[in-house]
Amino acid sequence: MPLPQLGRYELLSTLGRGAMGIVYEARDPLIERTLAIKTISCAGLSAAESEAFEQRFYREAKSAGKLNHPNIVTIHDIGRSDEQAYIAMEFLAGRSLRDILDSGAILSYAWIADIAAQVAEGLAFAHAHQVVHRDIKPANIMVLENGTAKITDFGVAQLPSGSLTMAGTAFGSPKYMSPEQVTGKTVDGRSDIFSLGVLLYELLTGNAPFAGDNLNATLYQVLNAEPPLPSQHNPRIPAAFDEVVAQALQKDPAARYQDAAAMAADLREIAACQPAASHQPAHEIAISSGSGDDTVAIDVVRDTGDEATLPAATPVPAVAAKRSSLPLAIGAVAVLAVGGAAFLLSRPASPPTGVAATAPAQPTPPASAADRAKAAAAEPLPVARQATDQAVAAAETPPAAPADGRVRLAIAPWGEVVVDGKPAGVSPPLMELRLPPGKHVIEIRNTTFPVRKQTLDVAADSNLRIKHKFE
């Protein structure tokens, strides 16, 4: 079945599908040029939100269309056809960094530094023209056959940000979002620098520095975790990369590179010091899953009283360098051996019913008839011994803990949540706490406003709510 026509463009094939629409290979019959067309979906939005979204799309796409740089995909046209907004852009023959990473390709350090430097140079040009990407990630970087890196999705990824942001949402890819994106603050080019630092980290180590089991765990790491330096994953990684990554991943934008051109210059220096890609020893990395690479909407302001839709965030420790499991196994065996010995020494000589006794390590002389009779007299009857063991087991079994209480959070615009003096996460995205019964001191902190502090008396299976707006 042939694909429908979009405006004057003939759709030839589907190149991919993303969170915001479908990308097609298309042909412009007027100038006989092959290009890529990305449709923009407003599904699920209200009429007002859809209109605001589209107006933002047109304005930002026009701005991005003015960017003429070798490391930025060229935008040719924007339009609308049958209620479907679209953007027509340069057709790129190559592979995305996501595909390259997932293929298990062997990457040289010179190649990594060159690709990252090209991306930084493209970002520097965009930032100089007041355009911020807001969704730098491997899937949005194309590498052409000649080695040129192209940043894609300018004018698309940044749509839901800025003064016309749909209330309470921000868009981005969780593993690559900057802390200011997560907390819903105004972002500038330094946010893209943070995301590029995450991308560089993944190119070097094969793992994103911030990755949790769920959305909230990942966002918690973005806000709080300090990942190990790349060279801690692999000592062969040049230490110069550590310095670039560390500066790019600073939580405070003021402590990062202040412009992408400075980051590009440092990466060019690293590339110049590395052997040529064709002569450098293989740099093989274990690629982690690409999950979490999709652009999603997250709540950054929620003060409507609606039911929380995100799971409670769980504090996750910083990503640790991979270690051999052998020392852990040896340690576990040693602990079990010592613990087992202590257990056997503390128990009576006779094993419980149904458990075979362990033969002594050294032979012992046979007991006399008198000794055997004395031991038999001291031995409890089997039924009595079984009852005794059952009573001991019952005494040692702790009673079932009462169910935790539930505390829903509605904090605007955002606040760091501290429970009994221990950080619990940032709300939003943290929308719910699970606390054991008892009194708990809850603090909501925002760097711009006084601390909100209150004591909650949490009962088992209770449902409580903290609603606070910093003003």
Image: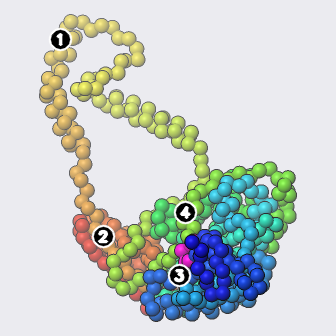
The reply to whether callout 2 and callout 3 are in contact (CB within 8 Å) is: no
Secondary element at tag 4: loop
Magenta segment, which residues? 17-21
Q: Residue at x 59, y 47 (%)?
A: 323
Residue annotated with mark 1? 373
Q: Position of residue 24 (x, y in %)?
A: 63, 75
Residue annotated with mark 2? 406
> Which mark is nearer the camera, 2 or 1?
2
Residue annotated with mark 3? 41
Q: CA distance from mark 2 to mark 3?
A: 36 Å
Q: Locate residue 176 relative to residue 303 in the image: left or right.
A: right
Residue annotated with mark 4? 291
- The earlier-in-sequence mark between 1 and 3 is 3
The reply to whether callout 2 and callout 4 are in contact (CB within 8 Å) is: no
> Which mark is nearer the camera, 1 or 3?
3
> Which mark is nearer the camera, 4 or 1?
4
Instruction: State which quadrant residue 417 falls in.
Output: bottom left
Q: CA distance from mark 4 to mark 1?
A: 70 Å
